Image (spheres, grey):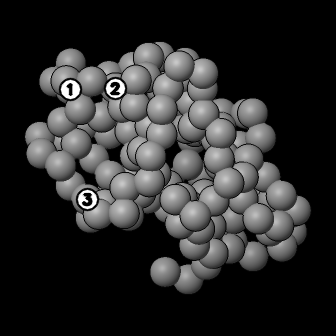
Amino acid sequence: FTGLVFEARDLPFSHAEGTYTKRLDDLGSQFIGSTKPGDWLRFTLPDIKPGRYELIGDFVVAYSYGIVEILLDGKVVGEPFDGYWAAIDGSGTQQSFGEVTLGGQHEVTVRIVGKNPAATNQIFSVKRWLLRPLE
């Protein structure tokens, strides 16, 4: 990958009240559980060189994972991502959330918006955030 890569489990984070989170080293991700629509997991990115980037999330997918939306500094970016998969795929799935303009420190939030009818729950797990320079 050409660009910046931030391991989610190594970033400072906060999460919605009533949820819990844990580092899943076997899957290389940061997990959040006990979730319902509106619950969130927020990551603080380190200082970023000013510029335009493609924001890409790398997620574990599983039979118990929900549909999430991504917010950059409190504003929704891109389209919702459905984390449902018939089994657990720890290798991850990358999803682009489009072009963003960054500079300095930013917060990326993953917020539960629902679940696939086939999913058994609406939890989720983030592997990493990738920023592909567009300039």
> Crowding at label 3, few (<14), some or many (≥20) Cα neighbours within 10 Å?
some
As displayed, is residue 75 above or below residue 114? below
Mark count? 3
Please say whether residue 54 is visible from this viewpoint: no
The residue pinned by badge 3 equals 90
> Crowding at label 2, few (<14), some or many (≥20) Cα neighbours within 10 Å?
many
Instruction: Tell me which label, 3 or 1, sits earlier in the chain.
Output: 3
Left or right of 91? Residue 14 is right
- The x, y position of residue 107, in whole percent, is 73, 47
Say what secondary structure mark 3 lies in. strand
The residue pinned by badge 1 equals 119
Q: Which mark is residue 122?
A: 2
- The x, y position of residue 66, in whole percent, is 34, 30
Disc 1 + disc 2, Cβ < 8 Å: yes
- Residue at image point 63% right, 75% down: 4
Q: Residue furthest bottom?
A: 2
